[in-house]
Amino acid sequence: MVISLKVNGTTRSVDAEPDTPLLYVLRNDLELNGAKFGCGLTQCGACTVLINGAAVRSCVMPIGFLDQNEITTIEGLGTGEKPHPLQTAFIEEQAAQCGYCINGMIMSAADLLKRNPQPKEDDVRAALAANLCRCGTHNRIIRAVMRAAQANGRT
């Protein structure tokens, strides 16, 4: 079955069943590999994308429910030439170690900063609590989100 999805501002058609998880379509059909497969149970956050601006775990989101929705992956958040403020802050704070969780951290943080442009540190910690990082860069990740929030306040 051919299903149309609007991903990173472009409508794309994929031949897949409506119950296929979005993560599989992003990675296998659209070659957007920023979202990672972690647990497959919505418990780690590595697969987080934005749907209509809200953070969603793509590993369990069936594509059949996504007609007329705007899907944003980390690839659509910024570019190499003009990275999103969160991407810049994560680089400046050296917040990525292995990099596996960073997609989910950044996408969850993007959702937070859209809802709360000037969060307190406790807000950031709460927003990212469901995103797991095994490398232990949590403090750098928190600093990166706070830096991005400060940068947003100056623009």
Image (cartoon, helix red, strand yellow):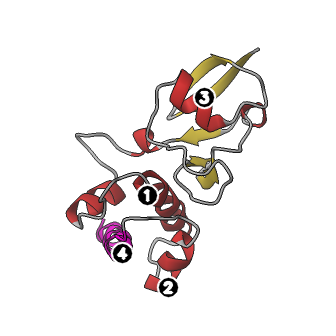
> Which residue is under mark 4?
146
Give neighbour class at mark 4: few <14, some 14-19, many 20+ (Cα, 10 Å): many
Task: Decide if residue 68 is on the left or right side of residue 136.
Answer: right
If you read the primary sequence from the N terminus, does the residue marked by circle 1 or circle 3 appear first?
3
Residue 49 relative to residue 89: left or right: right
The Cα–Cα distance between marks 3 and 2, rounded to whole angstroms, is: 34 Å
Q: Position of residue 135 (x, y in %)?
A: 36, 65
Magenta-span inclusion, residue 86: no
Q: Residue at x 40, y 56 (%)?
A: 102
Which element is circle 4 on? helix
Query: x%, y% of residue 123?
Result: 52, 80
Tell me the residue that label 3 is attached to: 25
The residue wearing badge 2 is 122
> Which SS class for mark 1?
helix
Looking at the picture, which amino acid does disc 1 mark? Ile
Q: Is residue 40 above or below residue 66?
A: below
In terms of sequence position, does the residue under pointer 3 or pointer 2 come before the other? 3
Tell which circle, 2 or 1, labels the residue nearer the N-terminal end: 1
Label 3 vs 4, first from the N-terminus:
3
Query: Alpha-carbon neighbours of circle 2 within 10 Å: few (<14), some, or many (≥20)?
Result: few
Magenta span: 136-155
Amino acid at the residue labelled 2: Asp
Query: Would you say the residues marked 2 and 1 are in contact, meaning their CB atoms lie under 8 Å apart?
Result: no
Magenta region, main secondary structure: helix
Give the residue pinned by disc 1: 106
Where is the N terminus found, in terms of image quarters?
Answer: top right
Residue type at mark 3?
A: Val
